Image: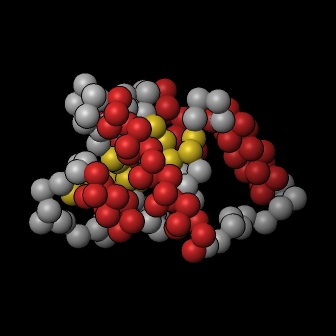
């Protein structure tokens, strides 16, 4: 099995630099996928992919190119679900993993919150990103990366 690649759903990702640092420390390729606004990297282990503008263009590219045991970093719950279906490890930007056991509830809560926003029951605000989220993300990605590497026999 080849070494895992880290895929970053980079639009609105607050932890791109942290993900690059962990990838570098573990010696893993990281692919940053976005609709634009990301500078290319001279580092051969950092690949930057700019996709056409579109609601799910980055998500679709990630799902098309990711394989089992790769790591997908996203806060997009439908993308997380699609990546899990491919056998990928999925981690949210706050360090919370999405797993086969948790993704069904995450999708249901997303749909419920969307319905409540549409009916005016709640406002559309997500929790703000905190320094503790950054720390939790770093720790979780390091652990997840090491686990994925052991599955390759390395």
Q: Picture quarter containing residue 146?
A: top left
Whole-percent x, y for residue 90 in the image: 48, 42
In this rendering, does residue 80 appear at all? Answer: yes
Note whether 61 is above or below 123 in the view shown. Answer: above
| In front of the other: 77 or 44 | 44
In this orientation, does residue 74 appear? no
The image position of residue 71, as x and y in percent, is: 39, 42
Left or right: 113 in relation to 22: right
Give the vertical position of 46 relative to 56 (above or below): below
Q: What is the residue that sits farthest to the bottom in this orientation?
A: 131
Q: How is the image coloured?
A: secondary structure
Q: Quadrant of residue 33?
A: bottom left
Question: On the rendered structure, is 82 left or right of 63?
Answer: right
| Residue 4 position in % (x across, y down) | 30, 38
Asked whether, in this view, residue 90 is left or right of residue 35, the answer is right
Identify the residue at horizontal 64%, vertical 30% (top origin). 101
Q: Quadrant of the C terminus?
A: top left
Give the residue displayed 17% in from the left and 65% down from the top: 41
Between 51 and 45, the residue placed more toward the observer is 45
Instruction: Count numbered badges in the picture.
Output: 0
Is the residue 128 above or below the residue 76 in the image? below
Q: Residue at x 45, y 37 (%)?
A: 89
Quadrant position of the N terminus in the picture: top left
Instruction: Give coordinates of residue 65: x percent, y percent.
Output: 29, 36
Residue at image position (83%, 61%) is 122
């Amino acid at each position: 099995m080849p070494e895992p690649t880290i895929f970053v759903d980079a639009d609105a990702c607050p932890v791109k630099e942290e993900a690059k640092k962990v990838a570098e420390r573990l010696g893993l390729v990281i692919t940053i996928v976005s609709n634009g606004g990301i500078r290319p990297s001279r580092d051969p282990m950092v690949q930057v992919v700019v996709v056409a503008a579109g609601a799910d263009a980055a998500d679709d590219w990630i799902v098309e190119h990711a394989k089992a045991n790769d790591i997908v970093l996203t806060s997009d719950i439908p993308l997380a679900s699609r990546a899990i279906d491919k056998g990928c490890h999925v981690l949210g930007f706050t360090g919370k993993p999405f797993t086969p056991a948790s993704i069904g509830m995450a999708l249901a809560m997303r749909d419920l919150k969307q319905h409540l926003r549409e009916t005016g029951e709640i406002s559309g605000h997500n929790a703000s990103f905190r320094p503790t989220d950054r720390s939790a993300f770093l720790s979780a990605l390091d652990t997840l990366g090491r686990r994925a590497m052991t599955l390759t026999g390395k």
